[in-house]
């Protein structure tokens, strides 16, 4: 069975603060991919990053960074110097070799206040 | 050009009616999906088609029937709408079901409100 847990339902920060969104997953697959998607208030789902289970190297893209730790089954997402435009619901997702679909976590609503 | 387009964007209807949501992708992808997002933002897979063949059929009432006339289209028909069907329905596509690293491309969603 596959499961993705995003324990933080809502987070509120003030602009320029750093914020980390947690994602913990469960899978029996040894090979799998992890994803993060952003859903801004406009409603569309925007792909942010994809990571395979063999690559634990952290990734940085501008103000965004991702920390993948297989030992703790976590794939956390950090936004540095948050901005109001970062306000959105963020979803972590998992797709394994034995599954035809992508399983999403419940999402974390991030509100960045000016 | 919109990669995955679904219509209508908003759908307001009475209980008991039958309605359809259309989805088209112009990405040349083989696999298409329907996801339901409830009021708490939880995204749940409903159906998936690969090259017009049904490959995922989650526990969904049989009032919901997907139809894929070709691999670029996956429509969702809902019979006898109920209040609990109110949600946002997202269509998505991916290049294939394998390799499983393929990301999903989502449509902009259809907000269904059943009164």
Image (cartoon, coloured by chain):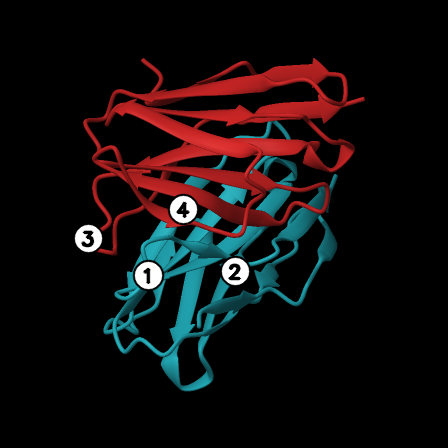
Chain colours: A cyan, B red
Residue at 59% over, 35% down: A40
Q: Is residue B57 above or below residue A30?
A: above
Label 4: how many residues lie within 10 Å, few (<14), some (14-19) or many (20+)? Answer: some
Q: Quadrant of the C terminus of chain A?
A: top right
Question: Mark 2 to mark 3: distance in Å?
Answer: 29 Å
Label 2: how many residues lie within 10 Å, few (<14), some (14-19) or many (20+)? Answer: some
Residue at 26% over, 48% down: B102
Residue A23 visible in the shown view: no
Residue at 26% over, 23% down: B72
Residue at image mark 2:
A78
Question: Mark 1 to mark 2: distance in Å?
Answer: 28 Å
Q: Please, which residue is most extreme toward the bottom here?
A: A71
- Residue nearest the observer in this picture, A69 or A7: A7
Among numbered discs 4 and 1, the one appearing first in the sequence: 4
Question: Mark 4 to mark 2: distance in Å?
Answer: 12 Å
Which label sits in the foreground, 3 or 4?
3
- Dot 2 lies on which element? strand
Q: Are marks 3 and 4 on the same chain?
A: no
Determine the image quadrant of residue A106. bottom right
- Dot 3 lies on which element? loop
- Dot 1 lies on which element? loop
């Amino acid at each position: 069975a596959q499961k993705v847990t995003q324990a933080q339902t809502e987070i509120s920060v003030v602009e320029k603060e750093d914020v980390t969104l947690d994602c913990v997953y469960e899978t029996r697959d040894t090979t799998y991919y992890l994803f993060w998607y952003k859903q801004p208030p406009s409603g569309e789902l925007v792909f942010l990053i994809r990571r395979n289970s063999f690559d634990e190297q952290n990734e940085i893209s501008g103000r965004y960074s991702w920390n993948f730790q297989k030992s703790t089954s976590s794939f956390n997402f950090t936004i540095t110097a948050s901005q109001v435009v970062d306000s959105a619901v963020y979803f972590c997702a998992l797709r394994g070799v034995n599954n035809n679909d992508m399983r999403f976590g419940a999402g974390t609503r991030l509100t960045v206040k000016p | 050009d919109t990669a995955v387009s679904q219509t209508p964007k908003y759908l307001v209807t009475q209980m008991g009616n039958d309605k359809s949501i259309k989805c088209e992708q112009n990405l040349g992808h083989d696999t298409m999906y329907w996801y339901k997002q409830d009021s708490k933002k939880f995204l749940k897979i409903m159906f998936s088609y690969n090259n017009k063949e049904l490959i995922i059929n989650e526990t969904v009432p049989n009032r919901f029937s997907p139809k894929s006339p070709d691999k670029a289209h996956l429509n969702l028909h809902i019979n006898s709408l109920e209040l609990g069907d109110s949600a946002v329905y997202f269509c998505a596509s991916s290049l294939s079901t394998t390799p499983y690293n393929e990301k999903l491309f989502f449509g902009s969603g259809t907000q269904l409100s059943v009164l």
